[in-house]
Image (cartoon, rainbow, N blue to C red):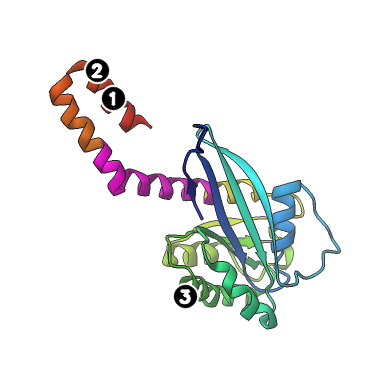
Amino acid sequence: MGRRDEDEEGGEEEYLFKIVMIGDSAVGKSNLLSRFARDEFDLNAKATIGVEFQTQVVDIDGKEVKAQIWDTAGQERFRAVTSAYYRGAVGALIVYDISRRSTFDSVRRWLHELDTHCDTTVARMLVGNKCDLDNIREVSKEEGKALAEEEGLFFMETSALDSTNVQISFEIVIREIFKNVSRKVLNSDSYKAELSVNRVTLVKDGANSKRSLYSCCAS
């Protein structure tokens, strides 16, 4: 799920990115999403059943981007249900709880599941949540960074409780998706064909085509 073409009336492009949040149960995925989308936190949040999603609009380089963020259930019994929802995802936050080492140990399994079900380039962020629980920490920040570096992930420690790094974590992923999509557009055959036509026109028509070529490259 990515870029949509201009509508028939010539409106601006709309970007709709599907992002999945994965990780073991009770690592705080739902509260991270609630904090990002509505600036809310629920101490009594119940475990997600199946899949829920929310859409948030973010401005990236002057363009309106809609992030459709899917909160997937972490319980094993729901994994067969949620696996289909990876389809079309272009971003993922893999979340663990810094106060529960078992959730960190599960990260590679979640990454494997992500790789198995996603057939597109996915911007991936490793999130060590609940950094407000530093006094009972079981996973060091250095361990999180090392795993992220090894697996080629962005990394951030967050707290949905006090909002630490929540906004920036989502925005980094969304911005990376936008970069990936933009790169694909620039490298697409249709774009190259358009650029080629403009170059031919440049030779024939002179100054007017220079403006056309510049416009094509700057878009």
Q: Position of residue 88 (x, y in %)?
A: 51, 62
Residue 94 or residue 155, whichever sits in front = 94
Q: Residue at x 21, y 16 (%)?
A: 207
Q: Position of residue 135 (x, y in %)?
A: 73, 63
Q: Which residues are the magenta region?
A: 173-194
Is 101 a magenta residue? no
Q: Is residue 58 above or below residue 203?
A: below
Residue 202 or residue 163, whichever sits in front = 202
User: Which kind of residue does numbered mark 2 sit on?
Assistant: Asn
Q: Position of residue 145 (x, y in %)?
A: 50, 61
Q: Residue at x 28, y 25 (%)?
A: 212
Is 182 a magenta residue? yes
Q: Which residue is mark 3?
A: 116
Q: Position of residue 129 (x, y in %)?
A: 66, 61
Choose the circle earlier in sequence order: 2 or 3: 3
Task: Tell me how far mark 2 sits from mark 1, CA to CA.
Answer: 7 Å
Q: Dividing the picture into quarters, in which one does residue 50 lie? A: bottom right
Q: Is residue 92 above or below residue 47?
A: above
User: Which kind of residue does numbered mark 3 sit on?
Assistant: Thr
Q: Residue furthest bottom?
A: 77
Q: Residues within 10 Å of mark 3 (few under 14, many from 20)?
A: few
Is the residue under label 1 in contact with that under label 2 (CB below 8 Å)?
A: yes
Q: Which residue is mark 2?
A: 208
Label 1 secondary element: helix
Q: Dividing the picture into quarters, in which one does residue 65 lie? A: top right
Q: Residue furthest right?
A: 44
Q: Which residue is mark 1?
A: 212
Q: Is residue 142 left or right of residue 40?
A: left
User: Which kind of residue does numbered mark 1 sit on?
Assistant: Ser
Q: Residues within 10 Å of mark 1 (few under 14, many from 20)?
A: some
Label 2 vs label 3, nearer the camera: 2
